[in-house]
Image: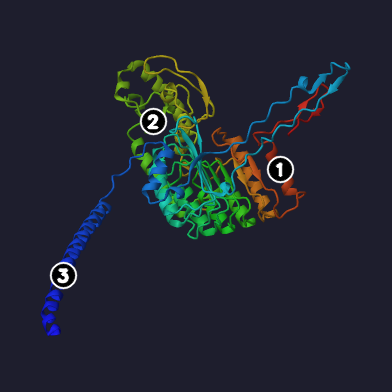
Amino acid sequence: MFAAGTGPSQGALIKSLSFVKKVKMGKRMEKALKEKAAASSTSQDAADDESKTPEPYSCTGMFEQDFTELCRRSGLQQGEIPPVVIRPKRPPTPPPPDPKAQTQVSAEDGEEEQKEPEEPKPTTYTTKDKFQYFKPTVQVEMENEDKPATVTEIYIRGWKVDDTMMGVLKQCLPTIEKLHTLYFWNTGLTEKTIAELASFLPQCSNLKNLTLDGNPVLEENFALLIGDDSLLANVSFRNNHITDKGAEMIGKALSTAKSCNKNLISLNLSYNKITDIGATHIANGLRMNRVVLSLSLASNQISDTGAKKLGEVLSRFPLTHEETVERRKLIREKGSPDRKSPSPPSRGRAESKDRPGSKGSGTVLDKTDKKRDKSSKKKQDAKKEKEEDKTVKGGAKKDDKWKKDTTRHGSKAEMQGTKTAKGKKTVGGKDKKGALLPESETPDVVEAINPLMDSVENIDGQLWIPGNRALINLNLSRNQISEGGFKALLLGVQYQMTLNSLQPNPALKGLMRISLNKNAISPSNDAVSKLQELMTTRDPFYKPPSQSPDGDSQSHGGQ
């Protein structure tokens, strides 16, 4: 009876417990669903925030601030951002010790006693924490360390500049107004990062010096950095494993028959793997280039063949077919406007009102010049006509006349204080208000003369032009040049000296210094001795021995 009577009550209890359990489970499920919904909405908001494009950062020109912020936005953690520090400098020389402090008179015994001064701490080096020296940093030079916007030089040494870091530099470097030097040493540059660097360097208007040393790149696309739009004046590509492949591209970047780099002054290609083939490409780049002043090919693999090609470019060489065609185009383009202005045939020149007052002005007079006194102008024109007719009858060429356009005195260009092709000249004249301008001596040249427009000589059906006399420093040390190469270079220098005596041009003095140490030839060789003797007097730092009152020469120290 008890068991039968308790059955229904137990069943009801079980049902009530299960119902309570279901209610609790429902509340838990409802709570879990609410939490899940809240979490999903939070994650969705976070995803939306991430998907939103962050506001672009506008660089301020303060390198440290811009560099740090751009690195942070690029995803670098705080400890991964290289700090910007002032470039370490050698400590100044300590002042000499005071001699009065070294001696002291003893009051007890009245004797002078030598006192040993305390040795100061060394100041020729600085110490850093452990491994601090090897951590990546960006070193800078500043005009004023108190002004962050006066960064002038940036040095990056010994750590990899990857695509992310190059992107950061691309944004902040063009905004630094005073930046003139950029230095990358052993930074693991690649073809992509070099191309990226070449794309924004022209935007750095004051950047003139670039060093990329110890950055071997398989594609050797260093020539992108010295293209036609490059503003760089001094470039160093040392120890980059540049072969003849890279030398060919660099030679074409220097000049071709149709283009020329007009800003590069100094190029250092030492410690590479350039052979005679690469030296020939570099020499071809110097054919039409009259801007490069210094070239270093030291510590390469150049022998007599490459040296002979360089010697040929220094002396004279025949024009190729492409160069001859380009010369004819330039003459035609130059000749077409000449028919309307300065120098048509001599008949009726005095009656032309558009003709300039002198042959050497090199400019076409404006309409305002017509208001000048006609009578005095006709007298000057008649006088100049006679001189020009004599010159034309004497066999002067059109190209020679074009070259001499800026050498006459009294021309309009000189009255305005412009530079001429007559060496150092006094730049003076008056400004727009009539005030006298300060006088100063400056090297000449109105603009770079295209070598294709230089005087030519027809030899056996080929047009020969004078070689490159703009290059003044050539370094071929530590190569494999023997007697044949030295003789070719000697002939090139001798030809330049002869041409300078016949056609002096202070703007084109020719080679002044050549370094040929440690080549495959004995220092006592006759060609070596002659070349050294010839170059000694051409060295701008050479000081001839002074004469004593007795007539004996006295040598100077450091000669």
65 w.r.t. 425: above or below = below
The amino acid type of the residue labelled 3 equals Lys
- Counting from the top left corner in percent of width and height, residue 334 is at 38, 40
Q: Nearer the viewer, mark 1 or mark 3?
A: 3
Q: Earlier in the sequence, mark 2 or mark 1?
A: 2
Q: Which residue is mark 3?
A: 22
Q: Nearer the viewer, mark 3 or mark 2?
A: 3
Identified at 77% across, 19% down, the residue is: 100
Residues at marks 3 and 2, CA–CA distance in whole angstroms = 119 Å
Residues at marks 2 and 1, CA–CA distance in whole angstroms = 51 Å
435 w.r.t. 184: above or below = above
Q: Which residue is mark 2?
A: 346
Identified at 64% across, 40% down, the residue is: 513
Residue at disc 3, secondary structure? helix
The amino acid type of the residue labelled 1 equals Gln
The amino acid type of the residue labelled 2 equals Ser
Is the residue marked by circle 2 packed among few (<14), some (14-19), or many (20+) residues within 10 Å?
few
